[in-house]
Amino acid sequence: MDKATLNVALLIDADNASASTIDPVLTVLAELGTVNVRRVYGNWSKPALKGWRDMSIRHGIEPQQQFDLTKGKNATDMKMTIDAMDLLARGRVEGFGIMSSDSDFMPLAMRIRQDGIPVYGFGTSRTPEGFRQACTRFIDVGALGGGGPDAAAAPEEEPLTFEDTLPRAIGARPPAGRPKKKQVGEDVLKLLIDAYDSVKRDARGYASLSAIGQLAGNRSSFDTRNYGYQHLSDLIEDVPNFQIENRDGGVFVKRLR
């Protein structure tokens, strides 16, 4: 089946997601298919949710009203989880996006993935590690040009435009003035090295980059966009531990040290 025809559901926790990030989030979810189900959950009597009220009209997102029935209890999370399980049970959704920085959605992401359905999480840099790892991919909205508090605290980064989130043409130079690349930490480097060591290599020691990326994705919610890169090949090029070779059959990588 053509990936573009796959049915994707985006569920948004309005209390824990910034409306200014919705454009790049929808672009990222295009990797999975067409976002036909779009719902945002919250108590719309709250002035703080005005941004989501405006975006729901602009992007055809269905608002889901949930009153705050008891102080300190979030009924919105419960409603969002119930709807996700209903969509899962119907068997018509082939990919999920969850916009929230709330760790309460960790069990939901794990349950959806048990049915072999990918879950993309979108949250801030303060999102708990449990929810990050429960997702197939977790993307820091600050790296997408989001307007949340984390993005405001990063003066070196400028907001991305919608066009910036689209894949670059082969050989095209990145636009000037875009976010600076974040340093690739030892944990990510170890993940890439372990993936390289685990895949099949040719006589010259080169391994398929797609095979490395697939294995790394199976072991972690790691996503190159969290480091300011559109593609894994872009990130690998900036890591001194690897050497890239472009072939007719794709991109191949060799570990140097």
Image (cartoon, rainbow, N blue to C red):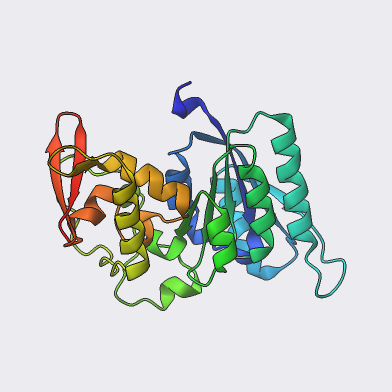
Residue 161 falls in image quadrant: bottom left
Q: Residue at x 30, y 50 (%)?
A: 197
Q: How many marks?
A: 0
- Image coords of residue 149 (percent x, y): 49, 74
Left/right placement of residue 132 relative to residue 79 reads left
User: In the image, is residue 72 above or below residue 193?
Assistant: below
Q: Would you say residue 169 is visible in this rendering?
A: no
Q: Would you say residue 52 is visible in this rendering?
A: yes
User: Split into 4 quadrants, where in the image is the C terminus?
Assistant: bottom left
- Image coords of residue 209 (percent x, y): 26, 43
Q: Residue at x 74, y 42 (%)?
A: 85
Residue 200 falls in image quadrant: top left
- Image coords of residue 203 (percent x, y): 14, 38
Left/right placement of residue 132 relative to residue 69 reads left
User: In the image, is residue 22 above or below residue 140?
Assistant: above
Q: Nearer the viewer, residue 222 or 12?
A: 222
Left/right placement of residue 62 relative to residue 179 reads right
Q: Nearer the viewer, residue 200 or 216?
A: 200
Q: Nearer the viewer, residue 127 or 116?
A: 116
Left/right placement of residue 200 relative to residue 153 reads left
